[in-house]
Image: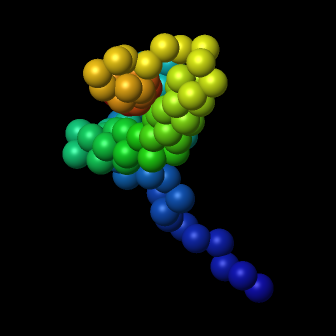
Amino acid sequence: MASASTCGNQDKDTHLPPPSKQSLLFCPKSKLHIHRAEISKIMQECQEESFWKRALPFSLVSMLVTQGLVYQGYLTANPRFGSLPKVARTACLPVRNAK
């Protein structure tokens, strides 16, 4: 037969405050302490992922659409620089808004 453990505190988390210091809104399943370094690491990963998976592709598609509109004649090209100013401005808008 399996013997029952006499020590019932093995399953409890040692990082929880005692019941007398817990507020009414205390949730034992939530983490009580998250390090600032961990949060900044997560935020950095989110910003990198946002850039590579959203901002950069949207910027490239916007540039291609703008170049196509200039080529088709819907937008007029600059007499001196051609379509470069419009395409460059279009490229900068999505990247700036992603930050």
Q: Residue 38, image x and y in percent?
A: 29, 47
State the quadrant of the N terminus: bottom right
Q: Residue 69, image x and y in percent?
A: 59, 23
86 is higher (above) or lower (below) than 49 = above
> Closest to the observer: 97 or 68?
68
> Closest to the observer: 7 or 26?
26
Q: Residue furthest right?
A: 1
- At x 30% / y 25%, what residue is drawn? 81
In the picture, measured across the screen, residue 69 lies left or right of residue 31, that is right
- At x 50% / y 39%, what residue is drawn? 60
Q: Is residue 50 visible?
A: no
8 is higher (above) or lower (below) than 21 = below
State the quadrant of the C terminus: top left
In the picture, measured across the screen, residue 96 lies left or right of residue 94, that is left
Q: Residue 44, image x and y in percent?
A: 31, 43
> Closest to the observer: 92 or 85?
85
Q: Residue 83, image x and y in percent?
A: 41, 26
In the picture, measured across the screen, residue 39 lies left or right of residue 30, that is left
- At x 37% / y 39%, what residue is drawn? 47
Colour mapping used in the image? rainbow
> Closest to the observer: 41 or 88?
88
